Structures are given as C-alpha cells and as structure tokens.
Image (spheres, helix red, strand yellow):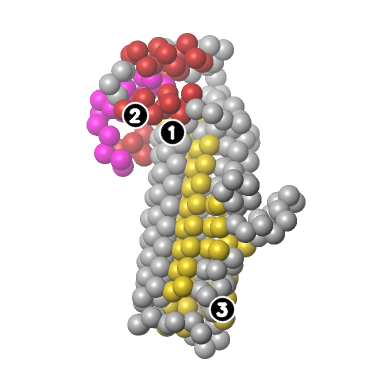
Amino acid sequence: MLERLAMTEIHPTAIVEDGARLGSGVRIGPFCVVSAGAEIGDRTVLQSHVVISGHTRIGSDCQIFPFASLGSAPQDLKYRGEKNQLVIGDRNVIREYVTMNAGTKPDQRLTQVGSDSMFMTAAHIAHDCVVGNGVVFANAATLGGFVTVGDNVIIGGLAAVHQFVRVGRNAIIGGVSAVVNDVIPYGMVAGDRAQLGGLNIIGMKRRSMSRQQIHNMRKAYRIIFSDMAALEKQLGMAQDAFPDDGNVADLIAFMRGHSDRHYCLPRRQLVI
C-alpha cells in the first residue's frame, strides 16, 4: 500500500494509486486522481478534481486548483504510448482547467516547467515545451509543441504561440496574439500575426536594470532592426557597440541561436 508520510492529507474520495510518491504535508482534496508514476513535493496542495497522470513530477509548495490536468498523453498523432514525463518546479500556482502534457521527443520525451510561476485558468502547455521561472500565463494562453519560453515572460490572455517558437526571457506577449515567430528577449509583441512593438521597458525596470543598461538595450535594438535585410551585419555592429553589456550579449546570442522559425519583426524598419 501507499506509504503516507506524516501530515499528508488525502480526502476519502480521492484516488491515489499505489506507487505514487507524496512528500510531507501534501494535501489531496476531493475527487482528485493521482497516478502510480506521479511524484508530488512537500506541501503541494491539490484542491479538488485534479488529475495527475503518468510519470509527472511536481515540486514543493505548489497550489493546484480544480479540474487541472497535468501529465496526460500529448495531443500528437505520432504518439504511440511511449513512456514520457512532465516535470514541474516549485511554488507554482496552477489555476482551474490548466492542461500540461507530457513529452513525445524520442531522445527525452519531456515537458519541463520551472518554478515561481502563475498559470491562469485554461492555460495550456503542449508536449515537449520548456518553460522557465517566474512566468505568467493569463487566461487561455496556449503553447504549441516544442515551444521554449524564457524566465519572467508574460503571455496575455487568449494568446497562442506556434510550435517550435522561442520566446526570450523577460518578453511580453499581448492578449489575443498569434505568435508564429521567435520573440527576442525583452521584446514586446502583439497582433495577428504578432509584430514587435519595441522593448519591455517596464520589465527591465522590474529586473532592476540601470538607466545605462536600458539605454544600451534600446540603442542595440535600433541598430539590429535598422536594416532587416542585413541581420548578421547589424548584430555584429551591436556587439561592437556594447562589448561589455551582458544583456545585449544575451540578445545577440538569442538571435544567433538555432531556430526553426524567423523573428517577430517591427512593423517598420527603424532609423538609427
């Protein structure tokens, strides 16, 4: 039988299969279902009607609201029942009807979600996504498969991110946006199809960036996007202009990194 650790509470109507691993202080509310392969960290709370499927690992101090479904089979026609996994970090708030699917990629079969994040009602994370720390997904924000989302990203309500897109750290995506291309770090995008509207200056200030660092990023942004037909040349110019700025270096590295998509671009070419 399942070993129930001290102070762990399981409602009589919940189903916790033999083999599930529960940390200390876990609370499982009415009508929840936890699979045999699941692992739930200390003090995490499943309020009610939560379903934890497959080989799902959830960290400590998470709050999971009714009707969330975590670790279910990926919505991918190629999936044939192979063993896969969903890993969720610590201190996340996962609201009603949120869905997160396990992975399908043959070499890892893993969907990974970081810590200290808020996933509002009906947000969806598809198979093989990698989501960083401190993110906010507003109501019904949706990721397609194989999306990568950096730390401190905000995705507005009803926004949808296309498969294989990369979203850089500290970016913000406006509500009801269709994002079909990569979003640069600190980028601010919106629309259908989403276009780059500038830099997330508020996010920079929240990350305690100095006035000089913000100035450098704005100048680098203008250099890079002043000639979209010669991107590599412009990246080199920005690198030469700010060789010691780590934030600019991260932006350039992101844009030089491998991607299956293009970039969200400004609505018009910038003039330096």
Q: Residues within 10 Å of mark 2 (few under 14, many from 20)?
A: some
| In-image side of 217 versus 32 (left or right) | left
At horizontal 47% and vertical 68% (from top left) the residue drawn is 39
Residue identified by numbered label 1? 185
- Alpha carbon of mark 1 to alpha carbon of mark 2: how far? 9 Å
211 is within the stretch colored magenta: yes
**Residue 84 appears in the rendering:** yes
Residue identified by numbered label 2? 247
217 is within the stretch colored magenta: yes
Q: Earlier in the sequence, mark 1 or mark 2?
A: 1
Q: Earlier in the sequence, mark 3 or mark 2?
A: 3
Residue identified by numbered label 3? 17
Kindly identify the amino acid type of the residue bearing the numbered disc 1. Answer: Pro
**Residue 99 appears in the rendering:** no
Kindly identify the amino acid type of the residue bearing the numbered disc 3. Answer: Glu
- Alpha carbon of mark 3 to alpha carbon of mark 2: how far? 47 Å
